[in-house]
Amino acid sequence: MGAHERLPGLGGRRRANGTLENEILALLQSAENALTPAEVAERLSTPLAHTTVATTLARLHTRGVLDRTPQGRSYAYTPVTDEPGLTAKHMFQVMNKGTDRETVLTRFVDELSDDDEDLLRRLLGTDE
């Protein structure tokens, strides 16, 4: 199995991309301390092979989403930040992929609700 893990009892359907990563991130964010791949696998809603969990954790670490520290013959993983921090990091990474920051930011702001626009103004200190 692998990136498109087959779910038992679902007629061979595969997990949607990112579903396992999201579940693992949520699990780690709610944990009181760092978890090893075996501990993560024990806590997942759907049983998965240890290697699948370890590979997913390693990918999240490579992408800068998780920190890891050696623990025995494995690693223990923790999120680099909380859920809002990860969302902000993702938004920043997506924005950096574009070639026209001004247009991207303009279109982003144009799509904000009035409440979000007011919040952004307050955060930037530009209340009018």
Image (tube, grey):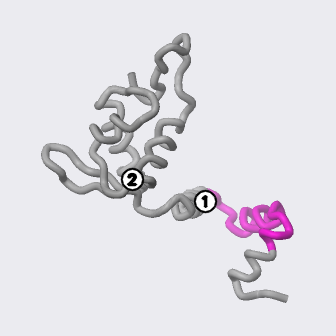
| Segment tinted magenta in the rendering | 97-117
The residue drawn where x is 40% and y is 57% is 79
Q: Secondary structure at mark 2?
A: loop
Q: In the figure, is residue 77 to the left or right of 10?
A: left
The residue drawn where x is 29% and y is 31% is 50
Residue 108 shown in magenta = yes
User: Closer to the observer: label 1 or label 2?
Assistant: 2
Q: Which mark is residue 69?
A: none
Q: Residues within 10 Å of mark 2 (few under 14, many from 20)?
A: few
Q: Residue furthest left?
A: 72
x, y percent for residue 45: 46, 32
The front one of 88 and 96 is 88
Q: In the figure, is residue 57 to the left or right of 10?
A: left
Vertically, is 12 above or below 58?
Answer: above
Q: Quadrant of the C terminus?
A: bottom right
Q: Amino acid at mark 2?
A: Ala
x, y percent for residue 98: 64, 58
Q: Which mark is residue 31?
A: 2
The residue drawn where x is 49% and y is 62% is 82
Q: Which residue is mark 1?
A: 91
